[in-house]
Image: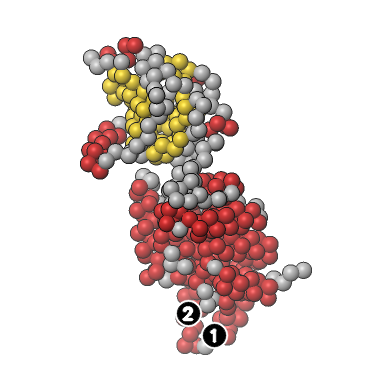
Amino acid sequence: MCIAVLFYRIGAIGQTIFNNKVKKIATFLDKGVPVPKENFTGTVWVNMNVKPDEGYNVNIGTVTFETKARTKWHSHKSGQMLFVIEGIGYYQEKGNPVQLIQKGDVVKIPKNAVHWHGASHNSSMRHIAMISDYDKDKTEWFQPVSDEDYYSYKPAITLEHSTINISDTAHKNHEELWIGYKSKAKETDPDLIEVFDNFAFDEVISHDTMDVKIRVLMIMASTIGSQALTEYKMFVNAALNVGVTPVEVKEVLYQSVPYVGVAKVIEFIYATNEIFRERNITLPLKSQSTTTPETRMEKGLAKQKEIIGNRVDDMYKNSPKDLFHIQQYLSANCFGDYITRDGLDIKIREMVTLSFLIALGGTESQIKGHITGNANVGNDRQTLINLMTQLLPYVGYPRTLNAISCLNEILPAK
């Protein structure tokens, strides 16, 4: 009986050899030339490694698919093999469900099987494609892959010892952030994952229409306040997967320093840099600073008054002389060095600050101040309720309820 497609992980030794070889190939290759548009959807390049006219009866090429790019339905008389060397993609054979393919996977495509392959909806993908018996081969191209087929991938959720009943909405929202992610906790703690995923990725997300980029940024900010490094790394990847820019990620991280303290933030900086390197994001990023040592106090004080209001004058007026320098630090350092930066607008920055404070706990006085600050820059009560709702699964009920108490005091329901 013919097996439609075989996906497997190469053993430890074989995997190392395979990876070393394909890395060497990829290192010396650029993206090559654009492929014929009539046979592909999206942006695709090919770089031919071995051509039949070189004396080998094979055709080997490295194909790079940008996010959402894919082939048309097609078949090869001699069959085909795909060696995935970067990113995450999809493969589907006619009549079978879409399969996830990622770095290290080998896809063996039977002769004459009608199929398509390409990048996933939030990641690029590169594979080496090989056709043997090239002198006997014939490639036939058919219709484009419909969006319905392309977006039909669903991860398997049945485990060896149990089945997790996660809603379709929770699956969709989870996959939007981490396509194909295989949770170890699903295997060891399926009951918890079922409850959490249905709550966090269905019930909570369905509460409002907060933009996914903003939601992910706010949760990411809260993980810094919570000192949850593992979850932070998950949400940095999620942020990049949904289109948050590296600058926006870094600006949230930098802004956490005056609120959380660099001693707690430094490990998050190192973790972020490692993720950026893995994604080939060049460091350092372009500076977003808008002040100089000469202007930081003036611009910081102006930004502080824009957010906090005239209460800033009272803070200076009522400050004891021996603590006057702290007021100056707040204006010049917290606001002048950080909040005046480009990369995030002021409404997002105030929501980020509030996310830090809620996650930190014990910051009710500052939470009240920044609820006022959010209102001053245009974030109304409903926006802040939505924010607190989205943070709830990650910071817990006590800190969320404390924040809601502050909200009801500063911006009471009408």
Q: Which residue is tagged 2?
A: 326
Is residue 379 visible in the rendered structure shown here?
Answer: no
Question: Real-space Cα distance between discs 1 and 2?
Answer: 9 Å
Q: Amino acid at mark 2?
A: Ile
Question: For residue 378, which quarter of the picture?
Answer: bottom right
Q: Residue furthest top?
A: 136
What amino acid is at disc 1?
Answer: Ser
Please provide percent x and percent y for residue 360: 50, 71
Q: Any mark on residue 62, and which?
A: none
* Disc 1, SS: loop
The residue lying toward the viewer, choosing from 343 and 46, is 46
**Residue at left offset 62%, top offset 77%:** 311
Q: Residue at x 43, y 23 (%)?
A: 35
Quadrant where the C terminus lies? bottom right
Vertical placement of 264 versus 284: above or below? Answer: below
Q: Quadrant of the N terminus?
A: top left
| Residue 47 image point, x, y percent | 34, 26
For the residues labelled 1 and 2, say whether their Cβ atoms are less than 8 Å apart. Answer: yes
Looking at the image, residue 153 lies above or below residue 269: above
The residue at 61%/72% (across/down) is 401
Q: Nearer the viewer, residue 209 or 37?
A: 209
In the picture of the structure, the residue carrying the numbered disc 1 is 319
For residue 375, say whether it is visible.
Answer: yes
Query: How many neighbours does mark 1 have within 10 angstroms: few (below 14), some (14-19), or many (20 or more)?
Result: few
Query: Left or right of 289: which side holds 304?
Result: right
